Amino acid sequence: MKRPTTQIYPTNTTLASPQAAASRGHPRVVLASSLGALFEFYDFYLYGALAATIGRQFFSALNDTSAFILALLAFAAGFVVRPFGALVFGRLGDLVGRKYTFLITLSIMGGSTFLVGCLPTYASAGVAAPIALVLLRMLQGLALGGEYGGAATYVAEHVAPRRRGYATSWIQATGSIGLLLSLVVILVCRGALGASFDAWGWRIPFLLSAILLAISIHIRLRLRESPVFLDMQRQGTVARAPLREAFGQWRNARLVLAVLFGVTIGQAMVIYTGELYALYFVDISLKIDSVTANTLMALALAIGTPFSLLAGWLADRVGRKRIVLVTTLIAALSIFPVFRGLTHFGNPALERAIVHSPVTVRADPARCHLQFDPIGKTRFRTSCDVAKTFLAHTGIPYSNVAAPTGSVAQVLVGNTVVTSFEGEELALPQFDLEQTVFRGALSGALDAAGYPHQADPREINRGAVLALLTLLVIYVSIVFGPLAAWLVELFPPRIRYSAVSLPFHIGFGWFGGFLPAVAFALVARTGDIYGGLWYPVLAALASVTIGLFAVPETLATDTR
């Protein structure tokens, strides 16, 4: 018997009639599907915004720099397993249906978020605490691997082709609302609890997710199966081996690869830079207090999120590809100026100090190591490591100059020279004493040069910082708005769930999920507070180039 083949149907085909029949339930379909995105991004931003607090609670045995980066890697652990979740739940969605599959993913995802708020800390449970945290992050990542593809597919299969861009853009917009909600919850809890927030109040935002979970499950239980999937069941065209058909047949696998490298990686870079790394930068690098940083980002999300809907509506008229790729290109080319602008308007004293009294580490390169210890066993005792550990911890940008082999590292603050010390042969009490003396001398030189411990609230141009953060959010919204419609329309219904989920979660999970950790490691390595931006900029530019030639426009076609 001849196997069904992938076909592209004209936009006026009668096969759209099941979607038209379902149009009366369209608002509920969009709401139910979008709640998963709200949940995903609520947790995503919640953990990201609280990374420093979580690092202290679960990795307290490490030095501060390692604890923070390891907390980011625990965050990224959930992204590592997303593609595997895409395979498991994508296959299930193509075999048994969209509704029940993403009902399962939502339950697992929400339960994992809630349980993070119940975990013991390192102080009370030792190494079991970070292990449990990472396991929950991975469990949530598995569920998320099947969530986006299911939601995008379910919405797209309920609406006519010329409405898909706008309808699916609600998924993206609701995701940004999830980010906004997490920030509001954090701000309210911090304001109400004060110092107690870091001690135990950080649990409350995770525990409150139970309310979102209950509402989301209640709404999704009332949904019916996708009309397109029901139509395939009636016609007997449901794929028997969706993974083999999607990834084992070159005509489909080639398109999956094109989507990965030409679409999702670039979009992940824009989205994670604009909505997560930007907050880290303002909070950690620019030393703007957390309440101000979170408030400004919340306002930026409130202003910029509706652009997702505008982009989705526009994509139904001018095409998906043009909007996504052009905006990705503009974002990549403007990221460096925007972040330098954040420094200029957010912490002018830091900018002045960098210009007038630049910090330089002059050391033997062979004696310098990356300031990251994932197991907490390494002691950074060379003179170069001692100097860079302190600078990385305090967020001071610096440049590197090679010194003769075997020389003791020196830190130059403008014209002031502070000599480090070699601590490898010292007993721990003597090392601690020498380190205290060195840090005191270096702190004095930094203070004299005008390096601020905190951004001066009187000098922060909040309007300008808000405008720049809003611009980044608008980039995110425009790039993300038409994305679901474009991805869904690239693949036929019988393998759509699997084919959409895998490249999306490799791009967003493996490439995007590691952006914070990679960027901060680059900053610690180079000393340049903008050094971490090279990763998203170069990846986005490469993705635009590939997508331009390898991924087709889908507006004029309909794969049902």
Image (cartoon, helix red, strand yellow):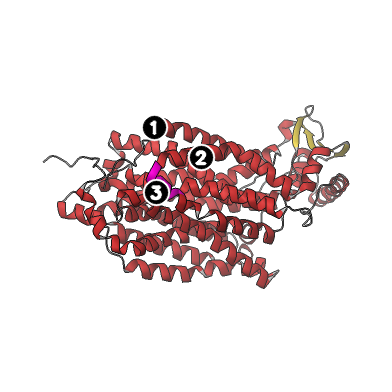
Q: CA distance from mark 2 to mark 3?
A: 15 Å
In the figure, is residue 79 to the left or right of 130?
left
Crowd around label 1: few <14 · some 14–19 · many ≥20 (10 Å): some
Cβ–Cβ under 8 Å for marks 2 and 3: no
Q: Which mark is residue 328?
A: 2
Q: CA distance from mark 3 to mark 1?
A: 18 Å
Name the residue beneath numbered marker 3: 484
The question of residue 205 being in magenta is answered with no
Q: CA distance from mark 2 to mark 1?
A: 16 Å
Local secondary structure at mark 1: helix
Q: Where does the image place residue 428, in percent across and percent down from the top left?
A: 79, 50
Callout 1, which amino acid?
A: Ala
> Which comes sooner in the sequence, label 2 or label 3?
2
Callout 3, which amino acid?
A: Ala
> Which residue is at the far left?
1
Name the residue beneath numbered marker 1: 550
Residue sitting nearer the eye, 316 or 36: 316
In the figure, is residue 475 to the left or right of 382?
left
Q: Residue at x 75, y 35 (%)?
A: 399
Callout 2, which amino acid?
A: Thr
> Which residue is at the far front?
317
Cβ–Cβ under 8 Å for marks 3 and 1: no
In the figure, is residue 386 to the left or right of 540?
right
Residue sitting nearer the eye, 260 or 524: 260
**Is residue 319 in view?**
no
> Which comes sooner in the sequence, label 2 or label 1?
2
The residues colored magenta run 311-319
Q: Where does the image place residue 258, in percent across and percent down from the top left?
A: 39, 35
